Image (spheres, rainbow, N blue to C red):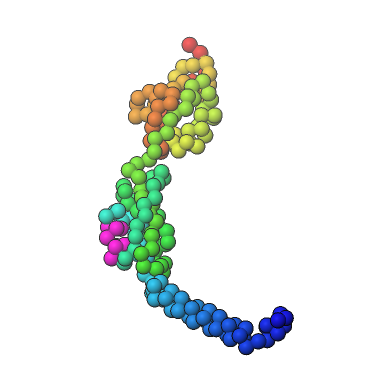
Amino acid sequence: MSIVKFLTSKVFVKQLVLAVTVVIVLSFLVLKWLNISTNHGEFKTVPDLTGKSLSVAQIELEQETLRIEIQDSANYNPDYPKFSVIEQEPKAGSQVKEDRKIYITLNPSGYSKVAVPDLRQRTFRQAKPTLEALGFKIGKITYIDNIGKDMVLGLRFKGNTIEPNEQLSKTSTIDFVLGNGNGN
């Protein structure tokens, strides 16, 4: 039998119609099953969790049948209480499906510790931006007799001398002891 005769035979046409019918019926059934199993058209509104404690955030998400996923944060925000939510994804008011993970970022207990570099024998002009770039604040400046004008002779924190590589919290205020340019 030639290929042309086979393609125009009743057996081939019956098989082709049967195959197309099966594909259409299966597609229809799969689409109906997806509509039912994915809760098509049903959404939950994400609550605003910013500023709330972890336990309150968990309760609110459970009430909406949403899941919580905690992401660690190294960025302390003094505007929020310790261990409270400072960010969330998706944002508050977003429409999501039931059982969706809501990613939250918690506020750590305080600023991270940073090593204070050795700035002795550098000028104040060099030392100031170095400390500010690390997140420290510049406090009061004290001058003592030394031949190096504006030379850093020491650093202090709350009246105590700071040793090189000592760990202080970010945003700590560091006082400078500088030379005044007068020799002994």
What is the span of residues highlighted in magenta in the rendered image? 56-63
Residue occupying the point 43% across, 74% down:
34
**160 and 112: which one is in front?**
112
Q: Residue farthest to the bottom?
A: 10
**95 and 41: which one is in front?**
41
Above or below residue 102? Residue 166 is above
Q: Position of residue 182 (x, y in %)?
A: 51, 16
**179 and 2: which one is in front?**
2
**116 and 37: which one is in front?**
37
Q: Residue farthest to the top?
A: 184
Q: Position of residue 136 (x, y in %)?
A: 44, 36
Image position of 161 (left or right of 145) = left
Task: Locate residue 8: give its quadrant.
Answer: bottom right
Main SS category, magenta section: helix
Above or below residue 168? Residue 61 is below
122 in magenta: no
Is residue 140 visible in this depiction of the protein?
no
Q: Position of residue 63 (x, y in %)?
A: 28, 65
Residue occupying the point 34% across, 60% down:
67
Residue occupying the point 31% across, 47% down:
82
Q: Position of residue 107 (x, y in %)?
A: 36, 48
Could you tell me how many numbered marks the image carries?
0
Is residue 183 visible in this depiction of the protein?
yes
Above or below residue 165? Residue 19 is below
Q: Quadrant of the N terminus?
A: bottom right
Residue occupying the point 48% across, 22% down:
120
Above or below residue 99? Residue 120 is above
60 in magenta: yes
